[in-house]
Image (spheres, rainbow, N blue to C red):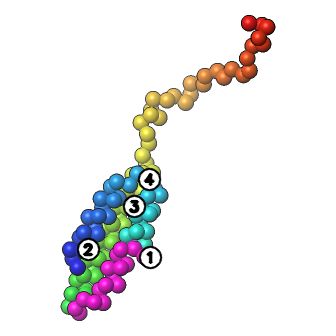
Amino acid sequence: MEEKINQIESEAIEAIKNAKDLSSLDDLEKKYIGRRGKFRELLQEISQLPEKERPKIGQLINQTKKKIEQIIENKKIEIRNWKPEISAAIDITLPGEKISYGHLHRLRK
């Protein structure tokens, strides 16, 4: 059971690191932590374990779940604070390019 928890943890961390936007992070949060997530499935499997192992495995699952939640929150903050480097090269105080409307009449050329 511990191996399964560690495998899900490493899989989740890798997926979170590769997430590029908030919607993909929300999907990952649902997949791992949500109501029908993988950690919920693990908690339901505890009933099949011997009585002596249940508290230990339960604590491990909860610690891992909290760790994943923290990593997701940190990644969300990182994505929200990310600013493209192009914005530094554009000065929004400069006047824009002149837009020409219409065209010259063909006899005026």
Of mark 3 and mark 2, the one earlier in the sequence is 2
- Secondary element under disc 2, as helix, strand or loop, is helix
Of mark 2 and mark 1, the one earlier in the sequence is 2
Residue at the far front: name it. 106
Which residue type carries mark 1?
Answer: Arg
- Position in image of residue 62 (x %, y %): 31, 76
Of mark 1 and mark 3, the one earlier in the sequence is 1
Badge 2, how many Cα within 10 Å: few under 14, some, many 20+? some
Give the quarter of the figure containing the C terminus.
top right
Single out the mark in the foreground, 1 or 3: 1
Q: State if disc 3 and disc 4 touch (CB < 8 Å).
A: no
Could you give the CA–CA distance between mark 2 and mark 1, rounded to whole angstroms? Answer: 17 Å
Query: Which residue is at 28% across, 82% downward?
Result: 58
Which residue type carries mark 2?
Answer: Ile
Mark number for residue 21? 4
- Secondary element under disc 3, as helix, strand or loop, is helix
Q: Is residue 21 left or right of residue 95?
A: left
Badge 1, how many Cα within 10 Å: few under 14, some, many 20+? few
Give the quarter of the figure containing the N terminus.
bottom left
Badge 1 is on which residue?
35
- Point out the stretch of residues depicted in magenta: 36-51
Which residue type carries mark 3?
Answer: Glu
Of mark 4 and mark 2, the one earlier in the sequence is 2
Q: State if disc 2 and disc 3 touch (CB < 8 Å).
A: no
Could you give the CA–CA distance between mark 1 and mark 3, rounded to whole angstroms? Answer: 18 Å
Badge 2 is on which residue?
5
Single out the mark in the foreground, 3 or 2: 2
- Residue 64: image quadrant is bottom left
Could you give the CA–CA distance between mark 4 and mark 2, rounded to whole angstroms? Answer: 26 Å
Could you give the CA–CA distance between mark 4 and mark 1, rounded to whole angstroms? Answer: 22 Å
Query: Which residue is at 43% across, 48% downward?
Result: 81
Mark number for residue 102? none
